[in-house]
Every structure is written in C-alpha cells, then in structure tokens.
Amino acid sequence: MAQHITKGEEFEKKAEKKINGWGLFGSKYEDAAELYAKSANQFKLAKSWDRAASVFIKLSNCYLKVDSKHEAASAYIDAANCYKKTSTQGAISCLDKAVNYFLDNGRDTMAAKYCKEIGELYEQEQNIEKSSSYFERAAELFENGGQGATAANQCKLKVAQFSAQREQYQKAIQIYEEIAQQSLNNNLLKYGVRGHLLNAGLCQLCRGDVVAITNSLEKYQDLDPTFSRTREYKFLADLASAIDEEDVAKFSGIAKEFDSISPLDSWKTTLLVKVKEALKAKELEDDDLI
C-alpha cells in the first residue's frame, strides 16, 4: 500500500511540474495527463479512493485545457467511481459534470446513462425528489439519443413510483397508462401491461374518487380487452366496490386474499395502507354523524 502511495505522489508531482514548466501549450497538458493517469491508478491500487478521485479531477482539467471534453467526462466518471467508496455526494458531483460534458459533445445516450446513475445514487440516499428529477431527465435523453422505449421506460417507471410516493398520483397514473399502451404492440413487453394497469389503478384508488376508478377500469378494458379476465382487474374492481361501500373489513380481506396468491411488494402495500387509512377515517366520520 505504502509503495503505491509513494509512486502516486511521485507521478502527481511530475505532472504538476510539467504544467508549471515551459513547453508548448497543448503538449505539456497531454504529458501531464499521462502522468496524472498513472498517479490516479497508483492511488487506486493503494485503495486511497479520495486521493485517486482528486487526481482524476486534475486529469479531467488537463483534458479540458486541450478541448477534449469526451476524455474529460471519462476522467470525471473514474473520479465518481472512486468517490462511490467514500462519498456519495462526491460521486454525484463528478457524474453531474460528466453529464454536462457529454451533452456538450452531443452524446445524449452517454449523458442519459449517467443521469440514471445519479438517480440511483439519490435513491440510495432516499432523496426521492432529486432521484425522480434525474430519472426523468435520463428518460428524455434516452429518447433524444434514439435508444427506443425500453431504456427510457425503465426511468419513467421510477418516476411513476416516486410520484406516487410523493402523492402525485395523476402524474404516476399518466406514466403507467402511457407505458401500458406502448407495450401492447410489443411481443416482449405486452406481458407487463397488466402490471402497469394495476399500478395505475392503485394510484386511482389513492385519489379516492370511486367514479374515476370505475371509469378507469372501463378505459383499461377498452385498451386491453384481455385485462378484464385477469386477477389484477378483479382485484381493482373488488377494492373499488369495498371503497364504495365504505367497508374496511372487506377491503382488508380482498387485499389479504390477493397477497396470498400474488405477493404485494412494499410499494403496493404502502399505497393500499393509505387507502385503508382514508377509508377508516371516513368510517369514523360517518359514525360521528350518526
């Protein structure tokens, strides 16, 4: 370890000497870049992640001096990968800079890839507002880069998930319905349609408008005539009936029965708990009026 640290420091000093010395403007930065790369790799071997990251940033600045933005972006990616070991915010900052340099070079797909990665890092930090923002940006960039629907839709589904968690139900519904419609004509994706429609329906339930829920189920049946024969359709219809009847026990029983056959994930469970709590509150309110 100590040996790698010593070598890393030596290469870093040589790089700085190159920059501060005489020489043709371009060549001295190219020479320094080569030395910084060697320095950073030595620090990586020593598992000195913060020092490696700081040298990769210096390497990026050398590339910027010779107007090589793609290489500058790549150096920031290397810095981010080092910071992931020690500082999520450091990693995010470096990835953000890389995204901007890729965009300057018209590399929308590369920018999208790292916007998605930033979204994932913010998700790990449980900052769903910022995570959602980066997933949304990634989806737009994937579409601009001509990557088709698959990569963009993966990001959009994250946006829908977080929108529902933030009680932005209409936004989530719109995304789930759009993806369901897109997926119908794709042999690989059409089997996911009922899952998207289930998610959209659960968001409708959270809005508490029984008429809207009924109308949505009719719309989903028109969209995909096979949906009305699925367990997901029956589940949503039965839940809507329990809400209309203001029957908390019935609502709980329907959810429990569905979960026993098709286990509900934590996201769906959280939405159902919200609906149930709202139903309980309505029940208590009605009791007080009697």
Image: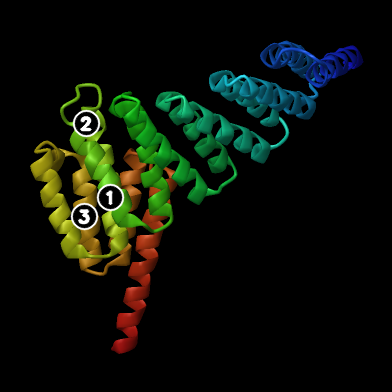
Q: Nearer the viewer, residue 232 or 127?
A: 127
Helix, strand or loop status at disc 3 = helix
Foreground disc of the pair 2, 3: 2
Of callouts 1 and 3, which one flags the residue occurring earlier in the amino acid sequence? 1
Near-viewer residue (202 or 147): 147
10 Å crowding of disc 3: few (<14), some (14-19), many (20+) = some
Image quadrant in which the C terminus is located: bottom left
Residue drawn at x 19%, y 58% is: 213
Q: Earlier in the sequence, mark 2 or mark 3?
A: 2
Residue that appears at 25% across and 56% down: 239
Left or right of 132, for residue 221: left
Task: Write the residue at 66% across / 31% down.
Answer: 84
> What residue is at 54 percent from the left and 20 percent from the top?
70
Q: Amino acid at mark 1?
A: Ile
Q: Identify the colour scheme used.
A: rainbow
Mark 3, residue position:
238
Badge nearest the viewer, 1 or 3: 1
Q: Which residue is mark 1?
A: 173
- Residue type (three-letter) at the residue carrying disc 3: Asp
Q: Could you say whether the residue bearing mark 2 is in a helix, strand or loop?
A: helix
User: What's the CA distance linking mark 1 and mark 2?
Assistant: 15 Å
Contact check, label 1 and label 3, Cβ < 8 Å: no
Given contact means CB atoms under 8 Å apart, are the residues at marks 1 and 2 in contact?
no
Q: Residue 210, how many percent across, how many down?
A: 20, 64
Q: Residue 201 in the image: state x and y as whole percent.
A: 25, 51
Q: Can residue 254 be seen?
A: no
Kind of residue sitting beneath label 2: Ser
Among all residues in the image, which is located at the extreme bottom?
290
